[in-house]
Every structure is written in C-alpha cells, then in structure tokens.
Image (cartoon, rainbow, N blue to C red):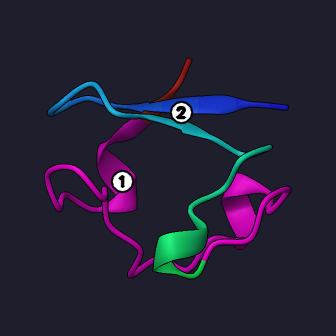
Amino acid sequence: MTKYICEMCGYVFDTEVGDPDNGVAPGTPWEDIPNDWVCPMCGVGKDQFAEE
C-alpha cells in the first residue's frame, strides 16, 4: 500500500491502516479520502501531503 507524508509535521498516512478515528477505513485509496479530511496531528489539508 501507499504512504503519504504531511509536509508540515511529518505525520505518515498509510492507506493500509487508514485513519479510522477520523472516518477513513483501512484500505481506502488516497483518491477516495474526502477532500475535507485533515492531518490528525497538525490539521492541515490533504493537499499538504506528498507520496512517500
């Protein structure tokens, strides 16, 4: 699976793990994550993440 890193705080989002606490089920492809999802560590938007 693919990982994305927050360019602001370094949080790593793993698509295999997801972010169940914030409504993103494990295995959800990055493109299917809602655009209003934010980094659980620093609160920046999805557009501040880069593929790792």
Picture coordinates of residue 23, whole percent (x, y): 57, 82
Give the mark toward the camera: 2 or 1: 2
Residue that sits furthest to the front in the current view: 21
Q: Is residue 9 left or right of residue 1?
A: left
Q: Quadrant of residue 9?
A: top left
- Pointer 2: residues within 10 angstroms few (<14), some, or many (20+)? some
SS at mark 1 in the image:
helix
Residue that sits furthest to the top in the current view: 52
Q: Nearer the viewer, residue 20 or 11?
A: 20
Q: Main secondary structure of the magenta part?
A: loop
Q: Going 22% across and 50% down the picture, which residue do you hit?
A: 41
Q: Quadrant of the C terminus?
A: top right
User: What segment is highlighted magenta in the picture?
Assistant: 24-49
Identify the residue position indicated by label 1 in the image.
47
Give the vertical position of 37 relative to 44 (above or below). Answer: below
Q: Quadrant of residue 26?
A: bottom right
Picture coordinates of residue 4, whole percent (x, y): 53, 33
Q: Is residue 42 left or right of residue 49?
A: left
Q: Is residue 7 magenta?
A: no
Q: Is residue 39 magenta?
A: yes
Whether tag 2 and tag 1 are in contact, CB under 8 A, the answer is no
- Pointer 1: residues within 10 angstroms few (<14), some, or many (20+)? few
Q: Going 63% across and 71% down the picture, which residue do you hit?
A: 33
SS at mark 2 in the image:
strand
Picture coordinates of residue 5, whole percent (x, y): 42, 29
Identify the residue position indicated by label 2 in the image.
4
Q: Going 85% across and 32% down the picture, which residue do you hit?
A: 1
Give the vertical position of 25 relative to 34 (above or below). Answer: above
